[in-house]
Amino acid sequence: MGISSAEWLVAPMVTIEEERAAALLTERFGIEGTLEDLGSNHDRNFRVRTGPDEHGYVFKVFNPVIDRAVLRAQSEATERLARALPELRLPRARVGVDGEHIQTVSVDGREYDCQLLDYVPGEPIMDSRYLAPRVVARLGELAGRITAALEGLDIPTPDRPMLWDLRNALEVVEALAPHMVDQRRAERVLRAARAAQQLVERRAARLPVQVIHGDVADNNVVCRTDPDGRPMPVGLIDFGDLTHSWAVAELAVACTSVLHHHGATPASVLPAVRAFHAVRPLGGDELDVLWPLVVLRGCVLVVCGQHAALQDPGNGYAAAALDREWAMFEAGASVPAEVMAAHFRQVIGEPAPHGDPPTSSHDLLPELLSEATVLDLSVTSDALHGGGWLDPDAESAVVARALASGGTAVLTRHGECRLTRTRVDTTEQGATLALGVEVHLTSPLAVHAPWVGTVTRHAEHGVTLTAGGCTWCSTASTRLSRSSTGARPYPVSSWAPSPHRAAGIGWMCNCPGWARELHHASLRQGWTRAG
């Protein structure tokens, strides 16, 4: 812990012109050809074309921070995959003039290690704007097969911490975020990383650790084009992030890379999770940490990409990735990890863990009148005709009209797809599904805990009541009947916060396996078993 930013950073690589690289290639490998700079965050990579009917090679000159033992481990892992997955296209190393796979070249008076690798034919999946579900599934399957094949491989531990090992993610983010130009974005990334790390730490000791490729992502997976025009993953390049880490991190990296593609949402990764699980089964702890690891991966991509662009302004490869790295972060941070864990369990056919629900001993809103109005904000609502739903304040207007007609309380409906939240003329999905219930009042109303549990005050307007596997969240302006400071929880058997003002109450309840539909009856009578 407490590693400085300098220890995470890799110094910019020396510039090597294509003509100079061609001479080095001939000198150390006896190969002549036409070279094209491929770009890299930290190394120098060149495509080598040796003839019109040949795939050619990739000539890599490595950053001096990379130890030779690491390069040998990468070659060993490549050969292991070649034996286990013979149909997989891989960048296998070629020997140089002295019979060794690793050669040394001199540039500007300094020595650098280099390798000549088979060029893997195909196009990176990153170049495809939209990824169809079966393409995403193939990416997940590939990550699973590679993870299974590398299990049991042992490689030396590097002398310096691995930047892309997700076990180090929070340290990397905390070290590099202060260097970001946009400090508001930096704060968002830090908050997301710390929250995700807390979720991972609870289960970290139980997560399987092994050697992983570490970057089975869309920019390292190459594809053939199927007859229907879809890119189908068939090869893997760049073993530079090979390391010991959590096995599930391989899947997290693959899932993260899906999130910047055209039309992608968090649910777009589900085919990858299902396919990975089919070839390398995921444990319960791995399912729970998968999405927090996706968030951490997005955070690391953002801070590293921003810093690489600042340190090496001429690196077009790093600069071109900044927008998609931010898109991956935003997508990952947009959904609670618990929601995604439930999706993952559902997609692989594993029931969600849950205990018995609490027994209701109090009406939640005992003073709520039975004639409270239930609003209709759906596509069938008469209150939204004539384009009224397009008004940004449409919901407030509907509430105001309902209260003005003589009502003292109006309720919204849980699980309703609200027309008022629809977004027009955009490719982004609107958050139309109501995950909670709102109560709008004309006067303050007492709220009682419906069951025995623990109350936690999170902010002036945020309170949660937890019991067993269920959590009730209130966003009302409330005054607790017992003193509470900060976010310190305390047990209650009866809890009666009173709103300071009549703006209303909003709440959500997370109780796996139990009915989510909150209506007036359930507010007074508690939860009922889902049928």
Image (spheres, rainbow, N blue to C red):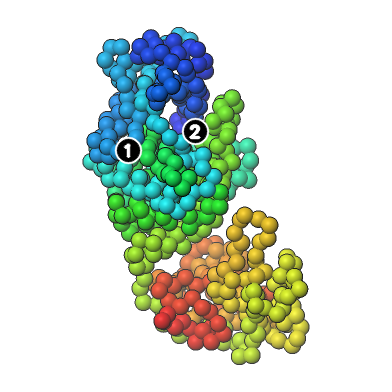
Whether pointer 1 and pointer 2 mark residues with C-beta atoms closer than 8 Å, the reply is: no
- At 40% from the left and 60% from the top, the residue drawn is 344
**Residue 86 location, x and y as percent?**
27, 37
Of labels 1 and 2, earlier in sequence is 2
Image quadrant holding the N terminus, namely top left
Q: Are there few (<14), some (14-19), or many (20+) residues within 10 Å of tag 2? A: some
- Identify which residue, 478 or 27, lies in the foreground: 27
Q: Nearer the viewer, mark 1 or mark 2?
A: 1
SS label for mark 2: helix
Q: Is 95 located above or below residue 256 in the figure?
A: above
- At 46% from the left and 15% from the top, the residue drawn is 21
Q: Is residue 509 left or right of residue 209?
A: right
- Identify which residue, 111 or 196, lies in the foreground: 111
**Residue 381 location, x and y as percent?**
67, 78
Regarding residue 66, the answer to whether it shows in the image is no
Name the mark on residue 476: none
Q: Is residue 457 left or right of residue 209?
A: right
Name the mark on residue 5: 2
**Distance between mark 1 and mark 2 Cα atoms:** 37 Å
> Quarter-wise, where is residue 114 in the image?
top left
The kind of residue tagged 1 is: Leu
**Residue 255 location, x and y as percent?**
44, 49
SS label for mark 1: loop
- Identify which residue, 366 or 149, lies in the foreground: 149
Image quadrant holding the C terminus, namely bottom left
- At 67% from the left and 69% from the top, the residue drawn is 420
Q: Are there few (<14), some (14-19), or many (20+) residues within 10 Å of tag 1? A: some
Regarding residue 267, the answer to whether it shows in the image is yes
Q: Is 179 located above or below residue 298 in the figure?
A: above
Name the mark on residue 88: 1
- At 59% from the left and 63% from the top, the residue drawn is 431
Q: Is residue 233 left or right of residue 374?
A: left
